[in-house]
Every structure is written in C-alpha cells, then in structure tokens.
Image (spheres, rainbow, N blue to C red):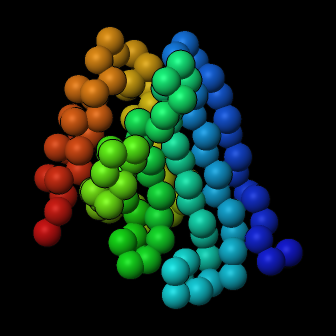
Amino acid sequence: MSETELIIQQKKISGNFGYEVKVRKVPPSPIYPDGYKINCALWLIEEKRKILILDAHEPFGTHLHPEPETNHDLRISVPLKDPIEVVEYFSVIVNRILSSADYKKVIQEVVNEANQYQI
C-alpha cells in the first residue's frame, strides 16, 4: 500500500446539488488513529457553496459541519467510526435532501437527530 490509498470516491450532480465522498486509507496517526481519512461534502452548484460537510478526524471523531461556509467551527458529533457506515449515513442524508423542497429543514432535522445521541 502506498502512503495514502483512495479506497472510496464518489462524485455526483443531481439537480442543483453536487456531492463528493472520499475515503482514503492512511497510516494511523494521532489525527487518524483508525487509519482512514473521510471527507464528504454537499454543495449548491449555482451558488458554488458547500452546505454540509461530514468528516472524521481527531480530536473530534466523526462529525457534521452543518454551516461550513459561515460557521466551520460548528461540529455535530456522529456516533460512527466505520468508513462504510459513515459513507452510507452521508448517502442517506443526501437522498433526504434531494427528495425535499427545503434542504435547510432537512439539515436541521439531521442536526437534531444527531444531537439526540450526544452524551
């Protein structure tokens, strides 16, 4: 294995939305102790701005950035570690947004759901 190996990459455009998922196998480190670098992003194409990010790194673990353009420091923890589960979770969120007329409402619902699992 090279120093980093791309193991999942998905990129798609649907209507006014685009999303990208990348999972890389990396050497375990203090930032990526499980050896995976996970980055998922959803953006509005016409406005050229990200509306949701899901990533995983220490010291935060897996987390959502529900306001990545205006408040990147806002992180909502998600109780997932396995990269496949993280990608599946992001896909569910994207599908919910794509099937809704109000993406902001869906993102708020996702945040509320994630907050139910906070300790």
Residue at point 69% right, 69% down?
Answer: 25
Q: How far across and how far down the image is residue 103, in percent? A: 33, 24
The residue drawn where x is 62% and y is 84% is: 28
The quarter of the rendered structure image containing the C terminus is bottom left
Please say if 87 is above or below 96.
below
Q: Is residue 34 above or below residue 114?
A: below
Location of residue 51 in the rendering, given as x and y in whole percent from the top left corner: 41, 36
User: Based on the displayed image, in which of its 4 quarters is residue 75 positioned?
Assistant: bottom left
Q: How many marks?
A: 0
Q: Position of residue 3 (x, y in %)?
A: 80, 77
Find the residue positioned furthest to the bottom.
Answer: 30
- Give the residue at x 28% y 27%: 104
Please tell me which residue lies in front, 103 or 73: 73
Side (left or right) of 32 relative to 7: left
Question: In this view of the protein, can residue 40 be seen by the observer?
Answer: yes
Where does the image place residue 6, in percent across and percent down from the top left? Answer: 76, 59
- Quadrant position of the N terminus in the picture: bottom right
Of the pair 49 and 43, the residue shown nearer to us: 49
Left or right relative to 106: residue 51: right
Instruction: Describe residue 85's horizontal placement relative to residue 23 as left or right.
Output: left
Judge whether 5 appears above or below 41 on screen. Answer: below
